[in-house]
Image: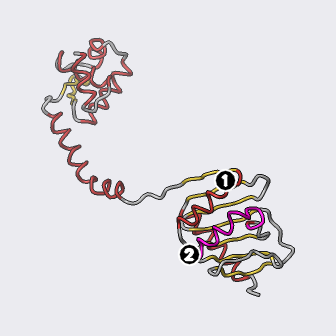
Amino acid sequence: MENLAKKLKFLGLTKIESKVYLTLLKIGMNKAGKISKEAQLNRTTTYGALKSLLDKGLVSYVIQSNRKWFKATNPKYILELIKEKEEEAEKILPKLIYMYKSPKEEHQVTLYYGYKGVKSVFQDILRTGKTVYVIDAEGQFSERMPYYAPHYKKEIEKKKIKIKHIVRRGVDINPTKTTLIRYIPKKTKSQSVIDIYGDKVAIIVWSEPPEAVVIKNKTAAESFRSYFEILWKNAKSI
């Protein structure tokens, strides 16, 4: 009985349902009280299992003298039940496969610390090779990383990566040949820089030592680019 109960559980019945169904097969058509006693379950639990088995079509009942007498359905019906589930699975399978194969958007947040960490961010910008949208009021890159900045700018020009750079008026950023610049008022100050490239947003804080966070999220990158374009339209080109 125990082994059969495990097999029935594998086929989708709960432990209690299996016990009640096997008891009915053993004792034949009977009242709930007798089933409860033979299965060694309380009446509430037995009634719950009988109701569930009725819904699944594994149990039926007849009324005699105003009392319900329950009986197990022919065990062959279990195969029919499995076939029905298989048919339903086949119906939804194409949609499930489509969802499985559809490209998933990766979400990732990475923290960087120190100058080596910030250098990793700029190297990632070079690897991505797409237009960079920069909001940088102070223009501290060349000053804070004087040995790496020339290499970065050389690679930007070599790869012909376009840069759209918004900077505070009066700040010299020593731009590359591929950089377009627009200016915001002198009173604007910020120790943070935002670089938007590909499906990533990098926020660099020029503290000492500097720190950076890179958000890999296509939706976030598109949103930041939209904000950038609003600022770009309102910034001055001279």
Choose between 104 and 77: the one closer to the eye. 104
* Residue designated by label 2: 158
Secondary structure at badge 1 equals helix
* 27 to 125, vertically: above or below: above
- Tell me the amino acid under the disc marked 2: Lys
Pick the front one: 35 or 214? 214
Secondary structure state at the residue bearing disc 2: helix
Q: Is residue 143 magenta?
A: yes
Instruction: Classify residue 103 as left or right of residue 96.
Output: right
Q: From the viewer's perspective, is residue 194 above or below residue 52?
A: below
Q: Position of residue 52 (x, y in %)?
A: 31, 32
Q: Is residue 168 left or right of residue 96?
A: right
Q: Mark 2 or mark 1: name the one nearer the start of the chain.
A: 1
| Residue for badge 1 | 116
Q: Quadrant of the N terminus?
A: top left
| Part of the protein shown in magenta | 142-161
- Which label was assigned to residue 103? none
Out of 99 and 62, give the one closest to the viewer. Answer: 99
What kind of residue is marked 1? Lys
Q: CA distance from mark 2 to mark 1?
A: 23 Å
Q: Is residue 62 magenta?
A: no
